[in-house]
C-alpha cells in the first residue's frame, strides 16, 4: 500500500458546533418511480410509502409534479408535496422492540424490506466471530457528517453496536475516529466504559483512511470484518428499534464562500436552494461555486433545481476564483501521490484510459498538481470526449 | 492558456526556484572570497576587479529581470526562470570572461529564449554550453589571476572546500553537497537524479581510472563543475524524466557519460552529457512506465496464485 497523505486545510473554515435541524420545509420533491400514478391533491401522512421506493418525510398534500435535478440525473420528474406541518404519522411498521431482542436474520430481512439493501447485504455477508469496526471518520476536507452523527447519537450508536457485537459474537469491536476529532474522543471515552467489549482507536488524519481498501491494511486486520459507519448504525437503530423509516440525511454545508458553515439534518427531497436560502449566508460581494459531495471526490453542480437525496452528503460553497492552468512541469507528483499506482499525467497526455484503469477518483492528483491541471473532470469522463479521449 | 476555477484552497505551489536563490548565497560569497578578495590581497588584481565574481551573476539576474519587463510580459514562472538562469550561468563561466561580451551574449540569448519556446532541451543548459564554448579552444582559462601567477597545486581538502579550478562561484564542493542535502528536503527537487549522477560518476570514474590510468583519481572525482551541474542543472524540473525509475536511469546515464567526456573536456563534460541524455528523457519515462506495468502484472499474478 502506498503512503497516505494528510491534506492541507484552511482552518478558518469552522463548522458551527451544533447540528441544525431543518424540520419545516415547505415543499418536498420526490422522484417519481416508473409507472407510478398518483392523483393530485392526495393527502399524505409522514413516513407514508408513496411508491415502492419513495417515502414521504412530511405529512401534507400532493400538489403536482416538477422536473428537478439529483446528483446523478438531470431533469427527473418529481412529486411535489406541500407540507401541512401537522406531522401526522403513518402507523408504526410493527410494535416497538429493543434491538437486542430482535434476531440477526430478522434485522437483515427488515432492512431489506425498507430498501436498505447495502446495509442488509453487509450484515448478511459477515461471518460470526468477525471484527466489527465503527468507522466514524470523514475523509473529505471540511465535511463532518459522521463526526456530527457520532456526537449527536453516540448513545444509540454504542447501544446498536453492542447489540450487533453480541449477535455476531465478534472477536473484537472497535470504534475508530480521527485524532483531530476532539469532541468525539472525549465523548466516546466518557461513554465507552459501560461497553467493556468495545475499544476506541484513534487514527491519524490521513486522507482516504476512511475507505475500506486503505483502512483494513492500515489496521492489519486479517480475519473477516464488518465495517459500519455511524450513519448506517443510526439507520439500523431507526428501522429496527424505533420502527421508523429513515427519511433524513445529514448534510455538511461549508466552504470559504459562506459566513456560517454548519451541519444540517435535512429531510430527503428538500430543494437545495430552499435550504440554503433559509440557513446559509453567502459572504458579501462573493461569487461562489457549489461543490456537491466534497472537493476531492465530488463535482461542481448547478443547484437551481437540485434536490436533497440519500446520496447527498455535503455542499461546499467555495469562492469563485480564476487561476491559469499552466503547462506541466514534469514534477511527477501526480504519479507519486496516486494511492493506486495510476499514471494520470500519461493518461492526460496520451488521451489513453489504460493508464488510469484502477482510478478510485480520489482527486489527489488534481490536489497536488502545481500546474493546476484538473484531472478529475477527465478521469470522471466529464470533459468533452473529443477533447480528452 | 485555459482558465479554470480554483477548486482547492491549497493547490500545491511550485516554490523550488525561490529556494534555489537562497541556496546560491553561500556560493556567491565564497566565489567573491576566492576569485575576488584573495587575488586582490595577493595584489594580482585591482580593487574594481575584485567584484568580478559577483558581477557576472548580477549581470545575469539583471538582464533576466529586465527583458521580460521591457517585453511587457506578465510576471510568471518563466520570467523568474530567466533571472535564475542568469544567476547560474554567471556562476559557472570563467572569471576571466569579457564583461562586455558576456553582457551582450546574455542579452541576445535571453531575448532569443523569450521569443522561442524551446521544448526538448533546457535553455539553461544551452546557455551554459554557449558561454563555455570559448573555453574549448583555450581562449579563456578557468584559473583566476592568482592561480595563473602562482601555478598553485591544491591539496584534496583545498579542492573539497572550494580552492578548486572552476567557474566564478561554483568551486565549493562542500557547499554543493550541503545544498544537495538542503534541496533534498524540498518536495519538488528531483534528488534521485542528483544522487544517481553523483553515485554513477564516482563509480564510473574509479572504473575508468583502473582501466586507463591517467591522472590523479581524486582530482578527477573532485571536479567541482561536474558536481555543481549535477546538483543544480541536471535536475531542472521541466526537462528531466518524471518517473522514479526514469530519473534514476537518466542520472546513471549522465554520470557514466560525464566520466568519459571529462577525460577530454573536464569543464564541459557534464554539460555535454546532460545535453546528449536530454534526447532520451521521454524514452526513460516510457521505459519506466513499462517496467512499472510489468511489476503490477507480476504482483497481480502473485496475488491470484495466493488466492
Ligand atoms: S483520482 Fe485516480 S489517478 Fe488521480 S490520484 Fe486518485 S486514483 Fe490516482
Ligand atoms: S503533478 Fe501536474 S505538473 Fe506535475 S507531472 Fe503531474 S501534471 Fe505535470
Image: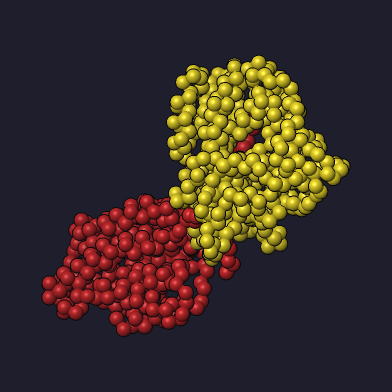
Chain colours: A yellow, B red
In this rendering, the count of numbered labels is 0
Residue drawn at 18 percent across, 64 percent down: B153
Residue drawn at 20 percent across, 56 percent down: B157
Image location (x, y in percent) of residue B31? 24, 67
> Is B174 on the left or on the right of B197, as rendered?
left
> Is B283 on the left or on the right of A89, as rendered?
left
Quarter of the figure that contains the C terminus of chain A: bottom right
Residue A97 in view in this figure? yes
Nearer to us in this view, A122 or A361: A122
Nearer to us in this view, B198 or B204: B198
Where residue A122 sits, quadrant-wise, is top right
Residue drawn at 59 percent across, 33 percent down: A229
Image location (x, y in percent) of residue B24? 31, 63
Residue drawn at 47 percent across, 30 percent down: A187
Residue A72 in view in this figure? no
Image location (x, y in percent) of residue A189? 45, 27
Nearer to us in this view, A154 or B306: A154
Nearer to us in this view, B288 or B30: B30
Image location (x, y in percent) of residue A21? 59, 40
> Is A382 on the left or on the right of B212, as rendered?
right
Query: Quick check: A75 above or below A360?
Result: below
Query: Quick check: B80 above or below B139?
Result: above
Amino acid at each position: 500500500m502506498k503512503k497516505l497523505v494528510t491534506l492541507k486545510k484552511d482552518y478558518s473554515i469552522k463548522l458551527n458546533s451544533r447540528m441544525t435541524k431543518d424540520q419545516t420545509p415547505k415543499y418536498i420533491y420526490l422522484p417519481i418511480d416508473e409507472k407510478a400514478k398518483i392523483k393530485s391533491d392526495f393527502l399524505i401522512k409522514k413516513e407514508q410509502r408513496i411508491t415502492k421506493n419513495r417515502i414521504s418525510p412530511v405529512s401534507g398534500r400532493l400538489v403536482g409534479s416538477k422536473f428537478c435535478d439529483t446528483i446523478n440525473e438531470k431533469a427527473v420528474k418529481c412529486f411535489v408535496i406541500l407540507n401541512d406541518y401537522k406531522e401526522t404519522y403513518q402507523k408504526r411498521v410493527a410494535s416497538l422492540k429493543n434491538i437486542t431482542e430482535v434476531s440477526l436474520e430478522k434485522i437483515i430481512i427488515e432492512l431489506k424490506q425498507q430498501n436498505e439493501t447495502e446495509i442488509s447485504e453487509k450484515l448478511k455477508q459477515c461471518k460470526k466471530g468477525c471484527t466489527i469496526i465503527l468507522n466514524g471518520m470523514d475523509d473529505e476536507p471540511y465535511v463532518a457528517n459522521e463526526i456530527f452523527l457520532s456526537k449527536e447519537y453516540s448513545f444509540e450508536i454504542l447501544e446498536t453496536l453492542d447489540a450487533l457485537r453480541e449477535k455476531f459474537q465478534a472477536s473484537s469491536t472497535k470504534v475508530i475516529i480521527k485524532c483531530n476529532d476532539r469532541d468525539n474522543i472525549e465523548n466516546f471515552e466518557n461513554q465507552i466504559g459501560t461497553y467493556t467489549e468495545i475499544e476506541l482507536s484513534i487514527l491519524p488524519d490521513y486522507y482516504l483512511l476512511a475507505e475500506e481498501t486503505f483502512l483494513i491494511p492500515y489496521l492489519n486486520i486479517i480475519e473477516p470484518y464488518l465495517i459500519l459507519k455511524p450513519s448506517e448504525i443510526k439507520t439500523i437503530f431507526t428501522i429496527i428499534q424505533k420502527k421508523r423509516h429513515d427519511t433524513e440525511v445529514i448534510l455538511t454545508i461549508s466552504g470559504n464562500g459562506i459566513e456560517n458553515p454548519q451541519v444540517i439534518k435535512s429531510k430527503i427531497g428538500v430543494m437545495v436552494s430552499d435550504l440554503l436560502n433559509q440557513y446559509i449566508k453567502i459572504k458579501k460581494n462573493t461569487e461562489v461555486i457549489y461543490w456537491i459531495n466534497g472537493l476531492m471526490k465530488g463535482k461542481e453542480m448547478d443547484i437551481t433545481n437540485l434536490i436533497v437525496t440519500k446520496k447527498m452528503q455535503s455542499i461546499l460553497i467555495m469562492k469563485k476564483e480564476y487561476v491559469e492552468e499552466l503547462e506541466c512541469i514534469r514534477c511527477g507528483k501526480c504519479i507519486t501521490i496516486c494511492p493506486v499506482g495510476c499514471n494520470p499525467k500519461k493518461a492526460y497526455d496520451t488521451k489513453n484510459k489504460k493508464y488510469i484503469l484502477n482510478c478510485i477518483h480520489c482527486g489527489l492528483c488534481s490536489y497536488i498538481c502545481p500546474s493546476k491541471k484538473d484531472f478529475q473532470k477527465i478521469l470522471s469522463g466529464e470533459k468533452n470526449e473529443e477533447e480528452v479521449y | 492558456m485555459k482558465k479554470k476555477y480554483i477548486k482547492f484552497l491549497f493547490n500545491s505551489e511550485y516554490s523550488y526556484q525561490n529556494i534555489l536563490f537562497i541556496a546560491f548565497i553561500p556560493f556567491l560569497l565564497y566565489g567573491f572570497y576566492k576569485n575576488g578578495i584573495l587575488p586582490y590581497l595577493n595584489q594580482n588584481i585591482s580593487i574594481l576587479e575584485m567584484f568580478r565574481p559577483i558581477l557576472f551573476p548580477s549581470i545575469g539576474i539583471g538582464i533576466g529581470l529586465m527583458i521580460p519587463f521591457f517585453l511587457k510580459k506578465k510576471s510568471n514562472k518563466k520570467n523568474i526562470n530567466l533571472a535564475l538562469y542568469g544567476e547560474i550561468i554567471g556562476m559557472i563561466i570563467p572569471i576571466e570572461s569579457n564583461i562586455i561580451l558576456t553582457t551582450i551574449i546574455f542579452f541576445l540569448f535571453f531575448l532569443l529564449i523569450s521569443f522561442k519556446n524551446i521544448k526538448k532541451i533546457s535553455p539553461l543548459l544551452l546557455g551554459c554550453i554557449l558561454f563555455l564554448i570559448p573555453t574549448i579552444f583555450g581562449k579563456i582559462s578557468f584559473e583566476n589571476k592568482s592561480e595563473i601567477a602562482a601555478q598553485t597545486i591544491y591539496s584534496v581538502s583545498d579542492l573539497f572546500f572550494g580552492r578548486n579550478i572552476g567557474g566564478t562561484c561554483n568551486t565549493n564542493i562542500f557547499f554543493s553537497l550541503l545544498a544537495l542535502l538542503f534541496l533534498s528536503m524540498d518536495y519538488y527537487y528531483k534528488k534521485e537524479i542528483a544522487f544517481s549522477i553523483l553515485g554513477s560518476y564516482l563509480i564510473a570514474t574509479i572504473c575508468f581510472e583502473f582501466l586507463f590510468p591517467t591522472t590523479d583519481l581524486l582530482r578527477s572525482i573532485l571536479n567541482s563543475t561536474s558536481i555543481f551541474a549535477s546538483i543544480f542543472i541536471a535536475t531542472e524540473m521541466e526537462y528531466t524524466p518524471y518517473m522514479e525509475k526514469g530519473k534514476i536511469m537518466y542520472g546513471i546515464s549522465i554520470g557514466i557519460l560525464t566520466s568519459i567526456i571529462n577525460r577530454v573536456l573536464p569543464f564541459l563534460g557534464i554539460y555535454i552529457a546532460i545535453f546528449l541524455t536530454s534526447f532520451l528523457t521521454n524514452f526513460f519515462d516510457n521505459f519506466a512506465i513499462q517496467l512499472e506495468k510489468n511489476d503490477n502484472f507480476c504482483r497481480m499474478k502473485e496475488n491470484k496464485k495466493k488466492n
